[in-house]
Image (tube, rainbow, N blue to C red):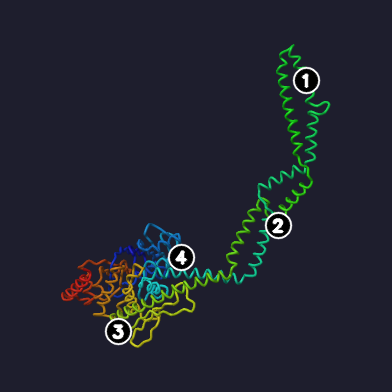
Protein backbone atom coordinates (compact mmCIF):
# COMPACT_ATOMS: atom_id res chain seq x y z
CA UNK A 1 0.00 0.00 0.00
CA UNK A 2 0.99 3.65 -0.41
CA UNK A 3 2.70 4.87 2.77
CA UNK A 4 4.18 8.26 1.97
CA UNK A 5 4.15 10.87 -0.80
CA UNK A 6 6.45 13.85 -1.19
CA UNK A 7 5.80 16.55 -3.81
CA UNK A 8 8.19 19.44 -4.52
CA UNK A 9 7.59 22.36 -6.92
CA UNK A 10 4.96 20.54 -8.95
CA UNK A 11 2.37 22.69 -10.79
CA UNK A 12 1.03 24.86 -7.92
CA UNK A 13 2.42 22.75 -5.05
CA UNK A 14 5.59 24.12 -3.49
CA UNK A 15 6.14 21.48 -0.83
CA UNK A 16 3.85 18.73 0.35
CA UNK A 17 4.44 15.59 2.42
CA UNK A 18 1.64 13.14 3.12
CA UNK A 19 1.43 9.98 5.22
CA UNK A 20 -1.23 7.52 4.09
CA UNK A 21 -3.26 4.97 6.01
CA UNK A 22 -5.38 2.01 5.04
CA UNK A 23 -9.11 2.14 4.40
CA UNK A 24 -11.13 4.65 2.38
CA UNK A 25 -9.89 8.26 2.14
CA UNK A 26 -11.89 11.03 0.44
CA UNK A 27 -10.22 14.06 -1.17
CA UNK A 28 -12.49 17.08 -1.24
CA UNK A 29 -12.18 20.79 -1.91
CA UNK A 30 -13.42 23.67 -4.01
CA UNK A 31 -13.47 23.34 -7.77
CA UNK A 32 -10.08 24.35 -9.12
CA UNK A 33 -8.32 23.81 -5.79
CA UNK A 34 -6.05 21.20 -7.33
CA UNK A 35 -7.59 17.90 -6.25
CA UNK A 36 -6.25 16.24 -9.39
CA UNK A 37 -2.67 17.30 -8.62
CA UNK A 38 -2.24 14.37 -6.22
CA UNK A 39 -3.33 11.93 -8.92
CA UNK A 40 -1.15 13.62 -11.54
CA UNK A 41 1.85 13.40 -9.23
CA UNK A 42 1.26 9.72 -8.49
CA UNK A 43 0.81 9.05 -12.21
CA UNK A 44 4.30 10.41 -12.85
CA UNK A 45 5.81 8.02 -10.31
CA UNK A 46 4.01 5.24 -12.16
CA UNK A 47 5.79 6.07 -15.41
CA UNK A 48 3.39 8.50 -17.09
CA UNK A 49 5.00 11.04 -19.38
CA UNK A 50 5.60 14.53 -18.03
CA UNK A 51 6.60 17.88 -19.51
CA UNK A 52 8.26 21.09 -18.46
CA UNK A 53 4.87 22.79 -17.84
CA UNK A 54 4.47 20.61 -14.75
CA UNK A 55 7.42 22.33 -13.05
CA UNK A 56 6.24 25.11 -10.74
CA UNK A 57 6.83 28.53 -12.25
CA UNK A 58 10.25 29.94 -11.39
CA UNK A 59 11.66 26.58 -10.17
CA UNK A 60 14.43 24.47 -11.66
CA UNK A 61 12.75 21.11 -11.23
CA UNK A 62 9.78 19.22 -9.82
CA UNK A 63 10.32 16.11 -7.72
CA UNK A 64 7.81 13.47 -6.61
CA UNK A 65 8.64 10.51 -4.36
CA UNK A 66 6.20 7.77 -3.38
CA UNK A 67 6.94 5.07 -0.81
CA UNK A 68 5.00 1.79 -0.93
CA UNK A 69 4.87 -1.16 1.46
CA UNK A 70 5.25 -4.34 -0.60
CA UNK A 71 5.16 -6.88 2.24
CA UNK A 72 2.29 -8.77 0.59
CA UNK A 73 3.55 -8.40 -2.99
CA UNK A 74 5.95 -11.32 -3.63
CA UNK A 75 5.61 -10.97 -7.41
CA UNK A 76 6.85 -7.38 -7.25
CA UNK A 77 9.72 -8.37 -4.97
CA UNK A 78 10.75 -11.09 -7.44
CA UNK A 79 10.54 -8.63 -10.34
CA UNK A 80 12.65 -6.06 -8.52
CA UNK A 81 15.21 -8.76 -7.71
CA UNK A 82 15.39 -9.79 -11.37
CA UNK A 83 15.83 -6.15 -12.40
CA UNK A 84 18.45 -5.60 -9.67
CA UNK A 85 16.28 -2.83 -8.21
CA UNK A 86 15.64 -4.17 -4.70
CA UNK A 87 16.06 -1.68 -1.86
CA UNK A 88 15.18 -1.85 1.82
CA UNK A 89 13.19 -4.85 2.96
CA UNK A 90 9.51 -4.68 1.92
CA UNK A 91 9.86 -1.09 0.67
CA UNK A 92 9.46 0.14 -2.89
CA UNK A 93 10.43 3.78 -3.42
CA UNK A 94 9.48 5.40 -6.73
CA UNK A 95 10.96 8.82 -7.50
CA UNK A 96 10.48 11.07 -10.51
CA UNK A 97 12.32 14.29 -11.34
CA UNK A 98 11.19 16.75 -14.04
CA UNK A 99 13.60 19.54 -14.99
CA UNK A 100 12.40 22.90 -16.26
CA UNK A 101 14.28 22.20 -19.51
CA UNK A 102 12.03 19.18 -20.14
CA UNK A 103 14.44 16.49 -19.02
CA UNK A 104 12.88 13.64 -17.01
CA UNK A 105 14.51 11.05 -14.78
CA UNK A 106 13.07 8.07 -12.90
CA UNK A 107 14.38 6.09 -9.96
CA UNK A 108 13.33 2.88 -8.21
CA UNK A 109 14.79 2.33 -4.74
CA UNK A 110 17.45 4.92 -5.50
CA UNK A 111 18.58 3.31 -8.75
CA UNK A 112 18.04 4.86 -12.16
CA UNK A 113 15.07 3.30 -13.96
CA UNK A 114 13.36 3.63 -17.32
CA UNK A 115 9.75 4.79 -17.62
CA UNK A 116 8.80 1.28 -18.70
CA UNK A 117 10.36 -0.17 -15.55
CA UNK A 118 8.42 2.36 -13.47
CA UNK A 119 5.22 1.40 -15.28
CA UNK A 120 5.93 -2.29 -14.72
CA UNK A 121 6.49 -1.71 -11.00
CA UNK A 122 3.43 0.53 -10.78
CA UNK A 123 1.17 -2.17 -12.18
CA UNK A 124 1.79 -4.13 -8.96
CA UNK A 125 1.22 -1.16 -6.68
CA UNK A 126 -1.56 1.20 -7.68
CA UNK A 127 -4.47 1.64 -10.08
CA UNK A 128 -6.07 4.94 -10.99
CA UNK A 129 -9.63 4.63 -12.25
CA UNK A 130 -11.26 7.48 -14.05
CA UNK A 131 -10.44 9.72 -16.97
CA UNK A 132 -6.72 9.33 -16.34
CA UNK A 133 -4.57 6.96 -18.32
CA UNK A 134 -3.35 4.47 -15.72
CA UNK A 135 -6.20 1.96 -15.83
CA UNK A 136 -5.19 -1.66 -15.75
CA UNK A 137 -8.77 -2.87 -16.27
CA UNK A 138 -8.58 -1.74 -19.89
CA UNK A 139 -5.79 -4.24 -20.58
CA UNK A 140 -6.89 -7.70 -21.78
CA UNK A 141 -4.29 -9.47 -19.64
CA UNK A 142 -5.49 -7.62 -16.53
CA UNK A 143 -9.09 -8.53 -17.35
CA UNK A 144 -8.13 -12.18 -17.72
CA UNK A 145 -6.16 -12.17 -14.46
CA UNK A 146 -9.08 -10.53 -12.65
CA UNK A 147 -11.54 -13.17 -13.88
CA UNK A 148 -9.15 -16.01 -12.99
CA UNK A 149 -8.56 -14.51 -9.56
CA UNK A 150 -12.30 -14.04 -9.04
CA UNK A 151 -12.90 -17.68 -9.96
CA UNK A 152 -9.93 -19.01 -7.98
CA UNK A 153 -8.27 -20.25 -11.16
CA UNK A 154 -4.82 -18.66 -10.83
CA UNK A 155 -3.04 -21.98 -10.20
CA UNK A 156 -4.92 -23.70 -13.02
CA UNK A 157 -3.98 -20.89 -15.41
CA UNK A 158 -0.31 -21.14 -14.43
CA UNK A 159 -0.35 -24.92 -14.89
CA UNK A 160 -1.97 -24.49 -18.30
CA UNK A 161 0.77 -22.07 -19.34
CA UNK A 162 3.34 -24.71 -18.39
CA UNK A 163 1.55 -27.40 -20.40
CA UNK A 164 1.39 -25.06 -23.39
CA UNK A 165 5.12 -24.36 -23.20
CA UNK A 166 5.86 -28.10 -23.01
CA UNK A 167 3.67 -28.80 -26.04
CA UNK A 168 5.23 -25.95 -28.02
CA UNK A 169 8.73 -27.20 -27.18
CA UNK A 170 7.94 -30.65 -28.58
CA UNK A 171 6.21 -29.08 -31.57
CA UNK A 172 9.30 -27.02 -32.39
CA UNK A 173 11.56 -30.05 -31.98
CA UNK A 174 9.39 -32.12 -34.29
CA UNK A 175 9.15 -29.33 -36.86
CA UNK A 176 12.89 -28.75 -36.77
CA UNK A 177 13.56 -32.45 -37.11
CA UNK A 178 11.30 -32.70 -40.13
CA UNK A 179 12.93 -29.68 -41.73
CA UNK A 180 16.44 -30.95 -41.21
CA UNK A 181 15.82 -34.70 -41.44
CA UNK A 182 18.20 -35.16 -44.39
CA UNK A 183 20.94 -33.13 -42.73
CA UNK A 184 20.48 -35.06 -39.47
CA UNK A 185 20.72 -38.38 -41.29
CA UNK A 186 23.95 -37.30 -43.01
CA UNK A 187 25.43 -36.05 -39.75
CA UNK A 188 24.47 -39.22 -37.94
CA UNK A 189 26.03 -41.37 -40.65
CA UNK A 190 29.30 -39.42 -40.41
CA UNK A 191 29.31 -39.61 -36.62
CA UNK A 192 28.76 -43.37 -36.70
CA UNK A 193 31.74 -43.76 -39.03
CA UNK A 194 33.89 -41.55 -36.80
CA UNK A 195 32.88 -43.42 -33.68
CA UNK A 196 33.73 -46.75 -35.31
CA UNK A 197 37.05 -45.39 -36.52
CA UNK A 198 38.11 -44.15 -33.09
CA UNK A 199 36.83 -47.23 -31.28
CA UNK A 200 38.82 -49.48 -33.62
CA UNK A 201 41.91 -47.43 -32.81
CA UNK A 202 41.51 -48.66 -29.21
CA UNK A 203 43.44 -45.67 -27.97
CA UNK A 204 44.27 -44.81 -24.39
CA UNK A 205 46.82 -42.36 -23.05
CA UNK A 206 48.74 -44.89 -20.85
CA UNK A 207 48.99 -47.39 -23.73
CA UNK A 208 50.08 -44.58 -26.06
CA UNK A 209 52.90 -43.57 -23.70
CA UNK A 210 54.03 -47.18 -23.34
CA UNK A 211 53.85 -47.71 -27.11
CA UNK A 212 56.12 -44.75 -27.78
CA UNK A 213 58.68 -45.94 -25.21
CA UNK A 214 58.58 -49.51 -26.56
CA UNK A 215 59.02 -48.31 -30.13
CA UNK A 216 61.99 -46.16 -29.16
CA UNK A 217 63.62 -49.18 -27.55
CA UNK A 218 62.84 -51.52 -30.47
CA UNK A 219 64.07 -49.10 -33.10
CA UNK A 220 67.43 -48.93 -31.34
CA UNK A 221 67.64 -52.65 -30.46
CA UNK A 222 70.76 -53.36 -32.59
CA UNK A 223 72.70 -50.54 -31.00
CA UNK A 224 71.53 -51.58 -27.56
CA UNK A 225 72.59 -55.21 -28.17
CA UNK A 226 75.99 -54.12 -29.39
CA UNK A 227 76.43 -51.86 -26.38
CA UNK A 228 75.44 -54.61 -23.93
CA UNK A 229 77.71 -57.18 -25.65
CA UNK A 230 80.61 -54.73 -25.64
CA UNK A 231 80.05 -54.18 -21.93
CA UNK A 232 80.09 -57.91 -21.16
CA UNK A 233 83.21 -58.42 -23.22
CA UNK A 234 85.24 -55.53 -21.81
CA UNK A 235 84.21 -56.36 -18.27
CA UNK A 236 84.64 -60.13 -18.20
CA UNK A 237 85.41 -61.90 -21.50
CA UNK A 238 88.28 -60.07 -23.19
CA UNK A 239 91.91 -61.07 -22.55
CA UNK A 240 92.37 -57.84 -20.71
CA UNK A 241 88.88 -57.78 -19.12
CA UNK A 242 88.36 -55.44 -16.23
CA UNK A 243 87.32 -58.19 -13.83
CA UNK A 244 90.44 -60.27 -14.65
CA UNK A 245 92.64 -57.25 -14.06
CA UNK A 246 90.86 -56.53 -10.78
CA UNK A 247 91.23 -60.16 -9.70
CA UNK A 248 94.98 -59.95 -10.27
CA UNK A 249 95.16 -56.66 -8.37
CA UNK A 250 93.21 -58.16 -5.50
CA UNK A 251 95.63 -61.08 -5.18
CA UNK A 252 98.62 -58.75 -5.05
CA UNK A 253 96.97 -56.37 -2.55
CA UNK A 254 96.17 -59.25 -0.21
CA UNK A 255 99.79 -60.33 -0.38
CA UNK A 256 100.95 -56.80 0.31
CA UNK A 257 98.79 -56.47 3.41
CA UNK A 258 101.05 -58.95 5.18
CA UNK A 259 103.74 -56.29 5.02
CA UNK A 260 101.62 -53.11 5.27
CA UNK A 261 98.16 -53.10 6.87
CA UNK A 262 97.40 -49.66 5.44
CA UNK A 263 96.61 -51.29 2.08
CA UNK A 264 93.45 -52.79 3.63
CA UNK A 265 91.27 -49.77 2.78
CA UNK A 266 92.46 -49.88 -0.82
CA UNK A 267 91.73 -53.60 -0.99
CA UNK A 268 88.22 -53.00 0.33
CA UNK A 269 87.53 -50.40 -2.35
CA UNK A 270 88.87 -52.65 -5.12
CA UNK A 271 86.81 -55.60 -3.89
CA UNK A 272 83.69 -53.39 -3.79
CA UNK A 273 84.34 -52.23 -7.33
CA UNK A 274 84.89 -55.84 -8.34
CA UNK A 275 81.52 -56.83 -6.90
CA UNK A 276 79.75 -53.92 -8.61
CA UNK A 277 81.27 -54.78 -11.94
CA UNK A 278 80.28 -58.41 -11.51
CA UNK A 279 76.67 -57.28 -10.89
CA UNK A 280 76.87 -55.14 -14.00
CA UNK A 281 77.99 -58.15 -16.03
CA UNK A 282 75.03 -60.19 -14.72
CA UNK A 283 72.63 -57.30 -15.60
CA UNK A 284 74.06 -56.91 -19.12
CA UNK A 285 73.77 -60.64 -19.82
CA UNK A 286 70.14 -60.57 -18.60
CA UNK A 287 69.45 -57.56 -20.81
CA UNK A 288 70.94 -59.40 -23.82
CA UNK A 289 68.47 -62.21 -23.26
CA UNK A 290 65.36 -59.99 -23.23
CA UNK A 291 66.17 -57.42 -25.91
CA UNK A 292 63.84 -58.03 -28.85
CA UNK A 293 65.04 -56.87 -32.24
CA UNK A 294 62.12 -58.40 -34.14
CA UNK A 295 61.58 -56.29 -37.32
CA UNK A 296 57.95 -57.41 -37.54
CA UNK A 297 57.13 -56.03 -34.12
CA UNK A 298 58.82 -52.74 -35.02
CA UNK A 299 56.67 -52.49 -38.15
CA UNK A 300 53.51 -53.19 -36.12
CA UNK A 301 54.42 -50.44 -33.66
CA UNK A 302 55.13 -48.05 -36.50
CA UNK A 303 51.74 -48.79 -38.11
CA UNK A 304 49.89 -48.34 -34.83
CA UNK A 305 51.63 -45.04 -34.11
CA UNK A 306 51.02 -43.80 -37.64
CA UNK A 307 47.30 -44.59 -37.28
CA UNK A 308 47.16 -42.57 -34.04
CA UNK A 309 49.01 -39.63 -35.57
CA UNK A 310 46.75 -39.68 -38.65
CA UNK A 311 43.63 -39.68 -36.46
CA UNK A 312 44.89 -36.79 -34.35
CA UNK A 313 45.60 -34.78 -37.51
CA UNK A 314 42.21 -35.66 -38.96
CA UNK A 315 40.35 -34.48 -35.88
CA UNK A 316 42.78 -31.62 -35.29
CA UNK A 317 43.65 -32.57 -31.74
CA UNK A 318 46.68 -33.87 -29.90
CA UNK A 319 46.83 -37.68 -29.65
CA UNK A 320 46.16 -37.41 -25.91
CA UNK A 321 42.81 -35.68 -26.71
CA UNK A 322 41.43 -38.50 -28.90
CA UNK A 323 39.44 -40.14 -26.02
CA UNK A 324 37.70 -36.80 -25.34
CA UNK A 325 36.91 -36.46 -29.04
CA UNK A 326 35.31 -39.91 -29.01
CA UNK A 327 33.18 -38.95 -25.99
CA UNK A 328 31.92 -35.82 -27.81
CA UNK A 329 30.98 -37.91 -30.85
CA UNK A 330 29.11 -40.43 -28.68
CA UNK A 331 27.27 -37.60 -26.85
CA UNK A 332 26.22 -35.99 -30.12
CA UNK A 333 25.01 -39.35 -31.40
CA UNK A 334 22.93 -39.71 -28.25
CA UNK A 335 21.34 -36.31 -28.90
CA UNK A 336 20.59 -37.19 -32.49
CA UNK A 337 19.43 -40.62 -31.47
CA UNK A 338 16.73 -39.20 -29.14
CA UNK A 339 15.52 -36.91 -31.92
CA UNK A 340 15.98 -39.33 -34.74
CA UNK A 341 12.88 -41.32 -33.97
CA UNK A 342 10.37 -38.96 -35.57
CA UNK A 343 7.44 -41.25 -34.87
CA UNK A 344 8.21 -41.35 -31.15
CA UNK A 345 8.58 -37.57 -31.08
CA UNK A 346 5.24 -37.13 -32.83
CA UNK A 347 3.64 -39.35 -30.21
CA UNK A 348 5.14 -37.24 -27.42
CA UNK A 349 3.90 -34.08 -29.10
CA UNK A 350 0.40 -35.47 -29.58
CA UNK A 351 0.26 -36.55 -25.93
CA UNK A 352 1.40 -33.09 -24.77
CA UNK A 353 -1.21 -31.44 -26.99
CA UNK A 354 -3.99 -33.64 -25.64
CA UNK A 355 -2.90 -32.89 -22.08
CA UNK A 356 -2.96 -29.17 -22.83
CA UNK A 357 -6.36 -29.33 -24.54
CA UNK A 358 -7.85 -31.33 -21.70
CA UNK A 359 -6.68 -28.81 -19.11
CA UNK A 360 -7.64 -25.87 -21.35
CA UNK A 361 -11.20 -27.17 -21.81
CA UNK A 362 -11.62 -27.54 -18.05
CA UNK A 363 -10.31 -24.02 -17.55
CA UNK A 364 -12.62 -22.70 -20.26
CA UNK A 365 -15.64 -24.29 -18.61
CA UNK A 366 -14.72 -22.83 -15.23
CA UNK A 367 -14.09 -19.43 -16.80
CA UNK A 368 -17.47 -19.54 -18.53
CA UNK A 369 -19.28 -20.16 -15.26
CA UNK A 370 -17.28 -17.45 -13.48
CA UNK A 371 -17.79 -15.00 -16.37
CA UNK A 372 -21.54 -15.43 -16.21
CA UNK A 373 -21.59 -14.91 -12.46
CA UNK A 374 -19.28 -11.88 -12.57
CA UNK A 375 -21.31 -10.38 -15.43
CA UNK A 376 -24.52 -10.66 -13.39
CA UNK A 377 -22.93 -9.10 -10.31
CA UNK A 378 -21.47 -6.15 -12.19
CA UNK A 379 -24.67 -5.62 -14.20
CA UNK A 380 -26.61 -5.57 -10.94
CA UNK A 381 -24.18 -3.05 -9.44
CA UNK A 382 -24.54 -0.82 -12.52
CA UNK A 383 -28.27 -0.49 -11.88
CA UNK A 384 -27.51 1.20 -8.54
CA UNK A 385 -24.84 3.48 -10.01
CA UNK A 386 -27.03 5.67 -12.24
CA UNK A 387 -26.71 3.28 -15.17
CA UNK A 388 -30.20 1.74 -15.12
CA UNK A 389 -30.73 -0.65 -17.98
CA UNK A 390 -26.99 -0.97 -18.52
CA UNK A 391 -25.45 -4.33 -19.11
CA UNK A 392 -22.00 -5.82 -18.49
CA UNK A 393 -20.58 -9.01 -19.98
CA UNK A 394 -17.32 -10.90 -19.80
CA UNK A 395 -16.98 -12.09 -23.40
CA UNK A 396 -14.99 -15.25 -24.05
CA UNK A 397 -13.95 -15.35 -27.70
CA UNK A 398 -12.69 -18.74 -28.94
CA UNK A 399 -9.21 -18.90 -30.41
CA UNK A 400 -8.47 -21.12 -33.39
CA UNK A 401 -5.29 -22.62 -31.94
CA UNK A 402 -5.26 -21.62 -28.30
CA UNK A 403 -2.29 -20.10 -26.52
CA UNK A 404 -0.53 -20.13 -23.16
CA UNK A 405 -3.59 -18.52 -21.57
CA UNK A 406 -6.20 -20.92 -22.90
CA UNK A 407 -8.62 -21.51 -25.75
CA UNK A 408 -10.26 -18.08 -25.62
CA UNK A 409 -9.49 -14.38 -25.62
CA UNK A 410 -11.25 -12.42 -22.91
CA UNK A 411 -12.82 -8.98 -23.17
CA UNK A 412 -14.89 -6.89 -20.76
CA UNK A 413 -17.89 -5.44 -22.64
CA UNK A 414 -20.49 -2.95 -21.54
CA UNK A 415 -23.69 -1.31 -22.76
CA UNK A 416 -24.46 1.89 -20.87
CA UNK A 417 -27.99 2.51 -22.13
CA UNK A 418 -30.92 0.09 -22.46
CA UNK A 419 -30.95 -1.59 -25.83
CA UNK A 420 -27.44 -0.44 -26.74
CA UNK A 421 -25.07 -3.08 -28.11
CA UNK A 422 -22.26 -4.34 -25.96
CA UNK A 423 -18.93 -2.65 -26.68
CA UNK A 424 -15.42 -3.08 -25.39
CA UNK A 425 -14.90 -1.46 -22.00
CA UNK A 426 -11.90 0.35 -23.49
CA UNK A 427 -14.25 2.20 -25.87
CA UNK A 428 -16.60 3.60 -23.24
CA UNK A 429 -16.50 7.37 -23.81
CA UNK A 430 -17.52 8.86 -20.47
CA UNK A 431 -14.83 9.04 -17.80
CA UNK A 432 -17.44 9.09 -15.04
CA UNK A 433 -19.25 6.04 -16.39
CA UNK A 434 -15.97 4.20 -16.84
CA UNK A 435 -15.00 5.03 -13.26
CA UNK A 436 -18.27 3.74 -11.86
CA UNK A 437 -18.08 0.56 -13.93
CA UNK A 438 -14.52 0.07 -12.71
CA UNK A 439 -15.77 0.58 -9.18
CA UNK A 440 -18.45 -2.07 -9.67
CA UNK A 441 -15.84 -4.46 -11.12
CA UNK A 442 -13.40 -3.85 -8.29
CA UNK A 443 -16.05 -4.35 -5.62
CA UNK A 444 -17.26 -7.58 -7.25
CA UNK A 445 -13.73 -8.93 -7.54
CA UNK A 446 -12.22 -7.22 -4.51
CA UNK A 447 -11.09 -10.48 -2.94
CA UNK A 448 -9.18 -11.37 -6.10
CA UNK A 449 -7.59 -8.02 -6.95
CA UNK A 450 -3.84 -8.01 -6.37
CA UNK A 451 -3.17 -4.27 -6.66
CA UNK A 452 -3.33 -2.95 -3.07
CA UNK A 453 -4.07 0.74 -3.74
CA UNK A 454 -7.00 2.01 -5.80
CA UNK A 455 -7.70 5.65 -6.66
CA UNK A 456 -11.03 6.72 -8.15
CA UNK A 457 -11.42 10.04 -9.92
CA UNK A 458 -14.82 11.43 -10.92
CA UNK A 459 -16.73 8.29 -9.97
CA UNK A 460 -19.54 10.60 -8.87
CA UNK A 461 -19.75 12.53 -12.13
CA UNK A 462 -23.38 13.04 -13.09
CA UNK A 463 -24.90 11.37 -10.02
CA UNK A 464 -26.31 12.48 -6.70
CA UNK A 465 -28.68 11.64 -3.91
CA UNK A 466 -29.28 7.94 -3.33
CA UNK A 467 -26.81 6.85 -6.05
CA UNK A 468 -24.10 8.95 -4.39
CA UNK A 469 -24.74 7.16 -1.11
CA UNK A 470 -24.44 3.82 -2.87
CA UNK A 471 -21.13 4.86 -4.45
CA UNK A 472 -19.86 5.91 -1.04
CA UNK A 473 -20.95 2.63 0.53
CA UNK A 474 -19.27 0.66 -2.25
CA UNK A 475 -16.03 2.58 -1.79
CA UNK A 476 -16.18 2.00 1.94
CA UNK A 477 -16.73 -1.69 1.37
CA UNK A 478 -13.82 -1.81 -1.05
CA UNK A 479 -11.66 -0.02 1.54
CA UNK A 480 -12.02 -3.00 3.86
CA UNK A 481 -9.65 -5.05 1.71
CA UNK A 482 -7.76 -2.34 -0.22
CA UNK A 483 -6.35 1.11 0.30
CA UNK A 484 -8.90 3.33 -1.48
CA UNK A 485 -8.77 7.04 -2.31
CA UNK A 486 -11.48 8.97 -4.10
CA UNK A 487 -11.54 12.51 -5.44
CA UNK A 488 -15.14 13.64 -4.91
CA UNK A 489 -17.37 16.69 -4.75
CA UNK A 490 -20.33 14.80 -3.27
CA UNK A 491 -20.92 14.99 0.50
CA UNK A 492 -22.67 11.60 0.45
CA UNK A 493 -19.42 9.97 -0.76
CA UNK A 494 -17.13 11.96 1.53
CA UNK A 495 -19.24 11.13 4.58
CA UNK A 496 -18.64 7.43 4.03
CA UNK A 497 -14.83 7.79 4.11
CA UNK A 498 -12.68 6.56 6.98
CA UNK A 499 -10.55 9.69 6.55
CA UNK A 500 -11.02 12.98 4.71
CA UNK A 501 -8.46 15.34 3.20
CA UNK A 502 -9.27 18.86 2.05
CA UNK A 503 -7.44 20.36 -0.90
CA UNK A 504 -7.32 24.15 -0.86
CA UNK A 505 -5.69 26.89 -2.88
CA UNK A 506 -4.24 30.13 -1.56
CA UNK A 507 -1.93 32.98 -2.51
CA UNK A 508 1.53 33.14 -1.03
CA UNK A 509 4.22 35.62 -2.02
CA UNK A 510 2.25 36.60 -5.13
CA UNK A 511 2.06 32.94 -6.17
CA UNK A 512 -0.81 30.46 -6.06
CA UNK A 513 -0.13 27.33 -4.01
CA UNK A 514 -2.19 24.24 -3.30
CA UNK A 515 -2.17 22.49 0.07
CA UNK A 516 -3.79 19.39 1.56
CA UNK A 517 -5.09 19.23 5.12
CA UNK A 518 -6.05 16.09 7.02
CA UNK A 519 -9.38 16.90 8.65
CA UNK A 520 -10.40 16.10 12.19
CA UNK A 521 -13.99 15.18 13.02
CA UNK A 522 -15.14 18.76 13.64
CA UNK A 523 -13.39 19.95 10.50
CA UNK A 524 -15.05 17.15 8.51
CA UNK A 525 -18.45 18.41 9.65
CA UNK A 526 -17.59 21.89 8.37
CA UNK A 527 -16.24 20.58 5.06
CA UNK A 528 -19.23 18.31 4.40
CA UNK A 529 -21.55 21.16 5.38
CA UNK A 530 -19.78 23.35 2.81
CA UNK A 531 -20.26 20.62 0.20
CA UNK A 532 -23.96 20.47 1.14
CA UNK A 533 -24.78 24.14 1.44
CA UNK A 534 -22.23 26.26 -0.32
CA UNK A 535 -20.57 29.37 1.12
CA UNK A 536 -23.16 30.36 3.77
CA UNK A 537 -23.44 27.60 6.32
CA UNK A 538 -26.34 27.24 8.74
CA UNK A 539 -26.79 25.18 11.88
CA UNK A 540 -29.23 23.03 9.95
CA UNK A 541 -26.59 22.30 7.32
CA UNK A 542 -24.00 21.48 9.97
CA UNK A 543 -26.48 19.21 11.72
CA UNK A 544 -27.21 17.42 8.47
CA UNK A 545 -23.47 17.01 7.85
CA UNK A 546 -22.94 15.58 11.34
CA UNK A 547 -25.76 13.11 10.80
CA UNK A 548 -24.27 12.01 7.48
CA UNK A 549 -20.89 11.46 9.14
CA UNK A 550 -22.49 9.50 11.95
CA UNK A 551 -24.32 7.32 9.43
CA UNK A 552 -21.07 6.73 7.54
CA UNK A 553 -19.23 5.76 10.72
CA UNK A 554 -22.02 3.35 11.65
CA UNK A 555 -21.22 1.33 8.54
CA UNK A 556 -17.76 0.63 9.96
CA UNK A 557 -19.04 -0.82 13.21
Image point 66% across, 50% down: which residue? 204
Q: Residue under circle 4?
A: 114
Pick whichever of labels 1 and 2 is earlier in the sequence: 1
Image coords of residue 27 (percent x, y)? 29, 71
**Res 150 quadrant in image:** bottom left
Is disc 2 surrounded by few (<14), some (14 to 19) or many (20+) residues within 10 Å?
few
Pick whichever of labels 1 and 3 is earlier in the sequence: 1
Q: Is residue 536 left or right of residue 372?
A: left
Pick whichever of labels 2 and 3 is earlier in the sequence: 2
Distance between mark 4 and mark 1 Cα atoms: 102 Å
Q: For this rendering, which residue is in front, 189 or 553?
A: 189
Which numbered mark, 4 or 2, is in the foreground of this view?
A: 2
Q: Residue under circle 2?
A: 314
Please, is residue 554 above or below residue 382 in the view? above
Which numbered mark, 4 or 1, is in the foreground of this view?
A: 1
Pick whichever of labels 4 and 1 is earlier in the sequence: 4
Distance between mark 4 and mark 2 Cα atoms: 53 Å
Image point 28% across, 80% down: which residue? 384
Image coords of residue 508 (percent x, y)? 30, 67
Is disc 1 surrounded by few (<14), some (14 to 19) or many (20+) residues within 10 Å?
some
Q: Residue under circle 1?
A: 249
Q: How many marks?
A: 4
Image coords of residue 79 (percent x, y)? 43, 63
From where the camera sits, is residue 52 visible? Answer: no
Distance between mark 1 and mark 2 Cα atoms: 65 Å
Please, is residue 265 above or below residue 121 in the view? above
Name the disc covering residue 388, or none.
Answer: 3
Image point 24% across, 77% down: which residue? 469
Q: Is residue 397 left or right of residue 482?
A: right
Mark 1 residue element: helix
Amino acid sequence: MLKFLSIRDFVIVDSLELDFSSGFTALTGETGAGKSILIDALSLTLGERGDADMVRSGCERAEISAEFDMTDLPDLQSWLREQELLGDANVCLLRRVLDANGRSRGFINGRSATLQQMRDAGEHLLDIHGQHAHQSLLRPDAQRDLLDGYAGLINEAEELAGLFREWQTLLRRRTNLEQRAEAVASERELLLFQRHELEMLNFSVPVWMELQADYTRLSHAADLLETAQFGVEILSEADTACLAQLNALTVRLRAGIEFDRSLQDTLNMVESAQNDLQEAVYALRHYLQKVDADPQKIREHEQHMAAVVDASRKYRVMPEQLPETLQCIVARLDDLGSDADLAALMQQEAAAREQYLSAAKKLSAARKNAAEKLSREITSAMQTLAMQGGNFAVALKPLAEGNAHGLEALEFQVAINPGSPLRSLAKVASGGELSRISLAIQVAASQAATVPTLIFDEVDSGIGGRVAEIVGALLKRLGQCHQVMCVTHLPQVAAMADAQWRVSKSSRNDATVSTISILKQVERVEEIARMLGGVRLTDTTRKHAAEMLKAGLSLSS
